Amino acid sequence: MRRRSVPRGLTALSLACVLHLPTPAAAASRCDDEQPTRQLPTDLALCAKLEAIVRKPSALPADQYQIALNRFLGAMCHRNRDAGWKMDKSVRDSGPFTATLVDGKWVGVSGGTHSPLVIWYSPDMIAWLRANRPIDASKEPARPAPVPDGAIMVNENKSFSTVL
C-alpha cells in the first residue's frame, strides 16, 4: 500500500478541537482551525469524476495521481455519505490518554504520536472490513481476503490526511 500525505491547507478539521470544549463560543476562542461552515462536498459531479480517478492509482503517473488526490480530498469528496462513505463513530486518540487527579481536578495528557483523528472509509473498504475484520473476532475468516484494489481509508487529523 502507498501512503500519500496532503498539505495541511487541503485537510479537514479534526473534530477533537470542538468535542472537549463546553460551548461553541469557547471552541472558537481555542481552536485555530475551526471552520464556520460544515466541511462537506459541494460539487458532487466533480467528486464522482475524481473518485473514479483516485480509485485507480496505477492508471496515472504519480505526479498526476497526486494532483487528482489533492483535489479529491480538498473538495471533501471522501465525506460524501450519499456515495456510501462512512466515518468512525468517534474521534480516535493516536495513542494512550492518561488522566490524573491534581488538586481536585482531572488533568489529561495525551501520549499519542499526533493529534486525535477520524477515519473515513470508502464503501468497498467498509465491506471488506465487515467481512474480514468483524467486531466478533470469532467470525473472522481463517484466510482474510486481500483488500480490494481501489478501496480507500482516509485518516483525518488536524495536521494532515493520509490515504492508506
Image (tube, grey):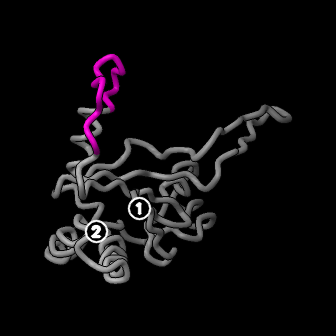
User: Foreground: 35 or 133?
Assistant: 133
- Name the spot of residue 2 as percent of width and height, x first: 41, 61
Which corner quadrant holds the C terminus?
bottom left
Q: Residues within 10 Å of mark 1 (few under 14, many from 20)?
A: few
Q: Earlier in the sequence, mark 2 or mark 1?
A: 1
Which corner quadrant holds the N terminus?
bottom left
How many numbered marks have been drawn onto this rendered protein structure?
Answer: 2
Q: Is residue 105 magenta?
A: no
Checking the image for residue 57, the label placed there is: 2
Q: Is residue 144 magenta?
A: yes
- Name the spot of residue 20 as percent of width and height, x first: 57, 48
User: Foreground: 54 or 146?
Assistant: 146
- Name the residue located 30 percent from the left edge and 73 percent from the top edge: 72
Element carrying mark 1: loop
Give the amino acid type for the residue marked by disc 1 in the picture. Answer: Arg
Q: CA distance from mark 2 to mark 1?
A: 9 Å
Q: Which residue is the site of mark 1? A: 2
**Label 2–label 1 contact, CB within 8 A:** yes
- Name the spot of residue 77 as percent of width and height, x first: 27, 67
- Name the residue located 48 percent from the left edge and 55 percent from the top edge: 15
- Name the residue located 25 percent from the left edge and 40 percent from the top edge: 128
What is the span of residues highlighted in magenta in the rendered image?
A: 133-146
Q: Residues within 10 Å of mark 2 (few under 14, many from 20)?
A: some
